Image: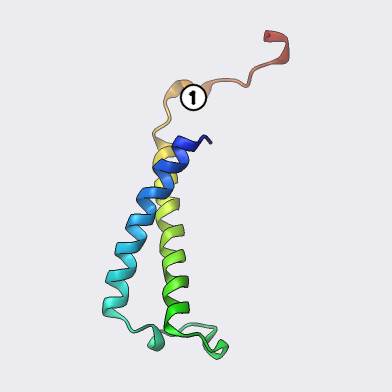
Amino acid sequence: MDAKSLIWILWPSFVVAGVAEALFFTVFDPMELPIPWRGASLNRLDVYSVGFLLFWILAAASSAFTCFLQRGAREVNRAPKDARDG
């Protein structure tokens, strides 16, 4: 994967994660969510950070899948270069 593909995946997913987090935490209070690590004394900023990372991972997976599906037939069917081909 080259740098251009990473930019195509990570930048839009970063923006989508920011919007998703803002919408989600506008509706839900982070201190009232039923999270399994409740006893770990997390504050709101910790929950916001974990939520943003989870949204970013989900959006990046979606963008990566889109890039995967955009490959042409030549990219999918090409055989790896043999050392004898020069």
Q: Which residue is at 46% across, 85% downward?
A: 43
The residue under label 1 is: 75
Dividing the picture into quadrants, the one containing residue 28 is: bottom left
Q: Which residue is at 41% across, 75% downward?
A: 48
Along the horizontal axis of the image, is 27 left or right of 3? left
Residue 66 position within the rendered picture, expressed as x and y whole percent measured from the top left: 39, 42
Seen in the picture, residue 11 relative to 78 is either above or below; the reply is: below
Q: Which residue is at 69% across, 16% downward?
A: 82
Dividing the picture into quadrants, the one containing residue 51 is: bottom left
Seen in the picture, residue 57 relative to 33 is either above or below; the reply is: above
Name the foreground residue: 84 vs 73: 84
Name the foreground residue: 78 vs 33: 33
Quadrant for the C terminus, please.
top right
| Amino acid of disc 1 | Glu
Could you tell me how many numbered marks the image carries?
1
- The outermost residue toward the right is 84
Q: Which residue is at 42% across, 83% downward?
A: 44
Can residue 65 be seen in this snapshot? no
Q: How is the image coloured?
A: rainbow
